Amino acid sequence: MAAPVQTTDLTGTWSIDPIHSSIAFSVRHLVVSKVRGTFGAFSGTITVGADGTPAVTAEIDVTSVNTGNEQRDAHLRAADFFDVEKYPTATFTSTSVTADGEDYVLEGDFTLKGVTRRISLPLQYNGVNPGMGHGAVAGFEASVVLNRKDFGIDIDMPLETGGAVVGDKVTITLEIEALKQA
């Protein structure tokens, strides 16, 4: 059993600051390269109780996907991929946080395209800074590899030479700065 999370300096409620945070992804393209993108609109809350128990909730506006190519972004929003008409948001709700050496593992339920799966995010806590006149900020980094097919994004676009136009594994990278609420 993992040691309990030490979060005494985080007690309270923190809001994810989308101006100083990012949610990025990369996926194999044509077997030999990667397409990278971001989600520009998201929000979330980190709450740490007096006993040190953390809880995290987050919501991503999937319609805000941006790969730098309008045609590709339109296809990602379509039913083949995210189907944003039916599922405009993805959500995350934590179920536990455990220590893993100097880092942590954030577990929770991630819902994308109407499918909920339990995921584990290796999490690096970068500490707390007093901020620049607007209150304390805390920093976190996490990265996870998800299989898009686990979330109903199962479009197959095979290449004549083998492989697929789009790979199954998607790497999600989170750089989070959260602002302590008064």
Image (cartoon, rainbow, N blue to C red):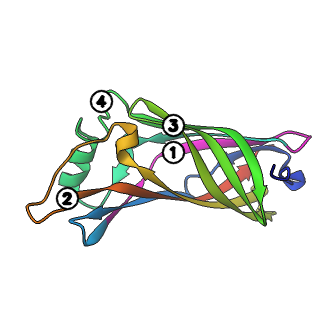
Sequence-wise first label, 1 or 2? 1
Measured Cα–Cα span from mark 1 to mark 2: 28 Å
Q: Nearer the viewer, mark 2 or mark 4?
A: 2
Q: Amino acid at mark 2?
A: Val
Residue 133, image x, y percentages: 77, 60
**Vertical comparison of 87 with 1: above or below:** above
Of labels 2 and 4, earlier in sequence is: 4
> Magenta-highlighted stretch: main secondary structure?
strand
Residue designated by label 3: 117
Secondary element at image label 3:
strand
Amino acid identity at mark 4? Glu
Identity, as a three-letter code, of the amino acid under mark 3: Arg
For the residue carrying disc 1, how many other residues have a C-alpha within 10 Å: few (<14), some (14-19), or many (20+)? Answer: many
Type of amino acid at the residue the image marks with label 1: Phe
Number of other residues with Cα within 10 Å of mark 3, as a class: few under 14, some 14 to 19, many 20 or more:
few
The answer for how far apart the CA atoms under marks 2 and 3 are is 25 Å
Residue found at x 76% / y 50%:
98
Residue corresponding to mark 2: 165
Mark 4 or mark 3, earlier in chain: 4
Select label 4 or label 3 by which is in front. 3
